[in-house]
Amino acid sequence: MNFPIDVARVRADADVFYRGEKLGYLDLRRWQEANSTRVEAHEEEAAALAVESRVKDAPLQITDDDVFTEVVRALVFGGKGVVLGIKADVDVETETALGKFIVREIPAEGKVFVKRESNSPARTAPTNYSSLMHRTAISGGNLKGFSPKIGSLQILETTKSALLIQAKIDITNPTDYSANVPFVNINLLSNGTKLGHATAKNISVVPGHNDNIVVEALWDPLSSGGKAGVDQGRELLSQYISGFNTTLTLKTHNGTIPSQPSLGQALSSFEVEIPTPKLKPPKNPNHRGDDDDDRDENAPHFIDDATMHLLTSSATFTLLSPLPHSTIYITYINATAFYNHTDPVGSILYDLPFAVPPGATQTPRLPVDWSLDSVGYEAVKQALGGTLKLDAKATVKVRVGRWEERVWFTGGGIGARIRI
């Protein structure tokens, strides 16, 4: 028999593989329109029928998150894209002179090249958040240029071990894509230890600068990381208030994008490290400034200045609170002042709580136990009536609401006025 045959529609059960491991399957159960072209016999090859069907927006169901992670890793860091293998049992609907027939489970296989997204002119039409995450990772390979800055900060709730913080963040989006983000949640880590998580809802992100993005962060090292979390959280806070260059690690998880847990889990292997956003305290309106201040201007200056009283063996400090809406309470101080970095001047041991409200605050007079035989104390006496640059090391207990923590502090270049 010799009669024409055409294929009008196809459908399939298709498994997708990466490097021999099954990634998932394509849901092609619905009939797809198809075109067929007769291929004439050539030499030893018999005549055939080439069938072409354009498949659009077919859902890929991930069945192995580990393999999916490898695919994402290859796309992000491989630089050239990946090759996926397809094995399918195909049903075809044929049209012949005798009528329509369905031929079932024809085995087929092939390969699909998944391209890495290339850089392109800025696209400002909003897309969905999962598409943005995909394109951001693939086009950039990292989030270099992402530079969050805190515009304002407010403590919403406190417990004995946790703070719920709301902040307005300014960020730079280094990609060419915009997005409307209904919900995203990212874990916050330091030195590999989880300390809490951050959540943003119903935000819009455009290429370049974005300001006043509202983010809620839960600082809860105890629940997030246990004793290791508490220890690492205390260390991070101590380094931060001392002006060290600290970082936070952002890490996705299976709840980052509720509608796509596999994507959040796969991206969790790509940790993004960012500088800890700076909390700059307000200026002291009574401080005239000091041209000889050798402290890092980008470091947090929570201690603005000090006055030491020799006759009464006491000292007062001007503290600048970084919290514009909450009062900090200092409940314990064990501190030592140094001259020339290493020569002790005196020490303070004080355990009566006092408040540090928003803005600039002068502490009560704190008792000083002078190091009478030291080079540092001699330098203090010689500076009577003037000022002296001092360093400090301290262990301090601070409380905000119900939350309380003991931290250490080191500071240098603190201008101390020396008075009788």
Image (cartoon, rainbow, N blue to C red):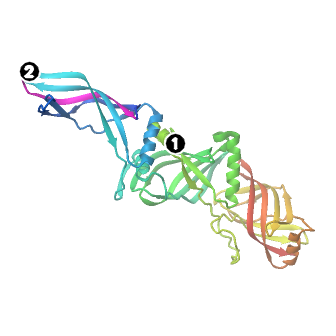
Image: 24 above or below 155: above
Residue 188: horizontal and vertical position, in percent? 58, 47
* Residue 274 falls in image quadrant: bottom right
Mark earlier in primary sequence (1, 2) = 2
Label 1 element class: loop
Label 2 element class: loop
Residue 133 seen by the camera: no
Residue 181: horizontal and vertical position, in percent? 44, 48
| Amino acid type assigned to the residue bearing label 1 in the image | Ser
Residue 77 seen by the camera: yes
The residue that appears at 17% across and 33% down in the rendered structure is: 50
Q: Quadrant of the N terminus?
A: top left
Q: Is residue 49 left or right of residue 330?
A: left
Instruction: Please provide the residue range marked out in magenta.
Output: 1-18
Residue 287: horizontal and vertical position, in percent? 70, 74
- Please state the total of marks drawn on the protein image: 2
* Residue 19 falls in image quadrant: top left
Q: Is residue 162 magenta?
A: no
Binning the other alpha carbons within 10 Å of mark 2 as few (below 14), some (14 to 19) or many (20 upward) gives few
| Amino acid type assigned to the residue bearing label 2 in the image | Leu
Prevailing SS of the magenta stretch: strand
Binning the other alpha carbons within 10 Å of mark 1 as few (below 14), some (14 to 19) or many (20 upward) gives some
Which residue lies under the disc numbered 2? Answer: 98
The residue that appears at 45% across and 32% down in the rendered structure is: 64
* Residue 268, numbered circle: 1
Q: Is residue 219 left or right of residue 126?
A: right
Residues 343 and 310: in front is: 343
- What's the CA distance linking mark 1 and mark 2? 56 Å
Residues 268 and 82: in front is: 82
Q: Is residue 10 magenta?
A: yes
